[in-house]
Amino acid sequence: MAEPYLSPPLPQHSRPVESFDPAVLATTREREHLRNVKKLINSAETVVTDALRGLSAAHPGLRVDPDGRTVSRSGGPTPGKVGLVSGGGSGHEPLHAGFVGYGMLDAACPGEIFTSPVPGQMVTATAAADGGAGVLYVVSFSV
């Protein structure tokens, strides 16, 4: 039986202690605050709107309404195609809005964090996806 191939050991890299400069670090209080940061958000009240504005900036091919909280394909509904709409609570991005695009969802309506979208959002998303052959709602949930 042939001997197994063993890769050579990786070199040990370490940062020399002399290169540590405490003057570059923030104050102790600022470091403590940064250590406790768990999320990168501006505020809990605007997190969904901020995320939708970011989605709009990153994907100009989507029609994003941050205030109405809907996302749809920029080309509009495809005539004769069953529209696909999904919606649900935000907080697990890119869930819902991240799947809007050609060959995927026609529209999505993200609700608040872990909260369902409101009926007005569903109506707007339905209108954006309706190509005359009906609209199918894709509902996702966890148990």
Image (cartoon, rainbow, N blue to C red):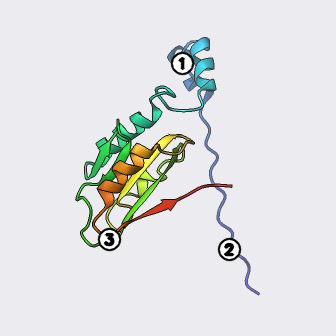
Amino acid type, callout 3: Ala
Q: Of marks 1 and 2, which one's residue comes earlier in the chain? A: 2
Question: How far is disc 1 from disc 2 in space, using C-alphas?
Answer: 45 Å
**Viewed as shown, does residue 12 lie left or right of 139?**
right
Residue placed under numbered mark 3 in the picture: 133
Q: Which residue is mark 1?
A: 25
Nearer to me, 67 or 58: 67
Residue corresponding to mark 2: 5
Q: Provide the secondary structure element on which disc 3 rests.
A: loop
Which mark is drawn over residue 132? none
Toward the right, the furthest residue is 1
N-term-proximal mark, 3 vs 1: 1
> Disc 3, disc 1: CB below 8 Å?
no
The tally of labels here is: 3
- The answer to whether 5 is drawn above or below residue 27 in the figure is below
Amino acid found under the numbered disc labelled 1: Leu
Residue 90 drawn above or below residue 81 = above
Q: Secondary structure at mark 2?
A: loop
Pointer 1 local density, CA inside 10 Å: few below 14, some 14–19, many at least 20: few
Q: Position of residue 31 (x, y in %)?
A: 59, 19
**Residue 138, position as x, y percentages in the image:** 48, 62
Q: Nearer the viewer, mark 1 or mark 2?
A: 1
Q: Residues within 10 Å of mark 3 (few under 14, many from 20)?
A: few
Of mark 3 and mark 2, the one earlier in the sequence is 2
Position of 100 with respect to 88 (left or right) is left
